[in-house]
Image: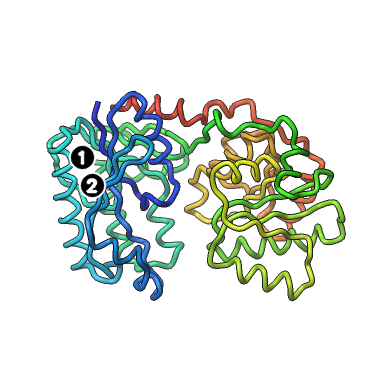
Amino acid sequence: MRILWVPHAPWHVPQREKYLLTYLGRHHSVYSTDWDTDFRRLRDYASRRYWRSFFPAASKEDGITVYHIPRIGPALFSRGLRAFNSRVYQEWIARVIERHHIDWLIASFVVPYVDFGIPTSIDIGDDNVAYWSESGGPQLYGREIAENELAWIRESRGVTVVSSVLRERLQRRVGPSKPFTVIPNGVDLDVFQPPLDKGRVKADLDLNPHFRYMSCIGSFNRHGEIERLLAVARRIQPLSYVRLVVVGRGKYIPLLQKRLAQEGLTGVIFAGFQQGDKLLRYFQATDVGLCPYPLTYGLHASSPLRLLQYSAVGAAVVIPPLQEVVRMRFGNVLLSGESDDSFADAALASLDSPGGVPNNLGEYHWKRLAHRMEQCF
């Protein structure tokens, strides 16, 4: 089968589409579009990535042919430009379908519905309407997201969603007659495994093999997460054998560093952005994985990648009681309260937790999830 996927996020952002397409590509010919839309700050419009977004391009990655769709910006604040870009996007999708004789299209909200004359489904990887509202973006575009999703849902043969919470929300909007299949986010269990010797992994990263390490690995673009990490740093300051390792990048990293210096908190290590094997080793060196998410309506319906990756290496995990996470029933998870201080209390208590790989984690292997998606075609 020849499959074309229209992702809900730019290709450079690691998302479910890339992982699922990688496994689907073992048995099918797979193609993806790519569309840069996340230009919000003034400096974004001076970036090389912004200027590249005007021109079409194609590339191949892990057996996936990726078509970069051109667009004119800034469109976020202009409905007319968004409509023009959408027409261009639709024309490119039609070209790819014709060129590669595509058998199945997996759509998303980023392009309005049009009948391309082939079987179609839609994959909804987040509560996109809620996420957009909570991000503070223009509300007019939030309504367009809702309209596009609803049109694809009504016209598609099937709908795949990231969580049971999101399925229930969408079923309330469109009624029970439409089939929804839950395909959560996953983890590559062939790669993410507990280390044979955690002390050696720590030493290889220049960490003390006798210390206990809490890790927060990801993108740091939510102010509330920084406040939670500061609360954790205050709790561990008196403990000479505990450190907090921050791995990743984001706009609030400088603020976190500044606040730590102001308060004289010295138990935090900044490892910077990592990828590949070194990123895996930071996960494997983790004793306690921190997911300092806020309790928002959008996040309640999420299936956190970070939680799954921590769990696969056998770490204990601290996370607030997001509705979908509670339903997952992972034995290595310690649910915190809603406040920053309660999150820090849970992080400290988790140092006594043995962690371990959850018994039901096999259900979240990307390979198994890709097979479940195949059954939707």
Residue displayed at 17% across by 49% down:
92
61 left or right of 283?
left
Residue of label 2: 151
Quadrant where the N terminus lies? top left
Q: Which residue does the image show at 34% across and 34% down from the upper left?
A: 63
Q: Residues within 10 Å of mark 1 (few under 14, many from 20)?
A: some
- Residue placed under numbered mark 1 in the picture: 155
Q: Amino acid at mark 2?
A: Ala
Quarter of the image holding residue 310? Answer: top right
Up-down: is 75 above or below 30? below
Q: What's the coloring here?
A: rainbow
Q: Label 2 neighbourhood size at 10 Å, few (<14), some (14-19), many (20+)?
A: some
Question: Does the residue at mark 1 contact the one at mark 2 (Cβ under 8 Å)?
Answer: yes
Out of 363 and 276, give the one closest to the viewer.
276
Is label 1 in a helix, a strand or a loop? helix
Horizontal side of 292 relative to 243 (left or right) equals left
Query: What SS does tag 2 mark?
Result: helix
Q: Quadrant of the C terminus?
A: top left
Q: Quadrant of residue 48?
A: bottom left
Residue 50: x and y, percent? 32, 65
Where's residue 150, x and y in %?
27, 47
Numbered badge on residue 170: none
Q: Is residue 281 above or below residue 373?
A: below
Amino acid at circle 1: Glu
Q: Nearer the viewer, residue 109 or 272?
A: 272
| Residue situated in front as seen by the camera: 298 or 119 | 119
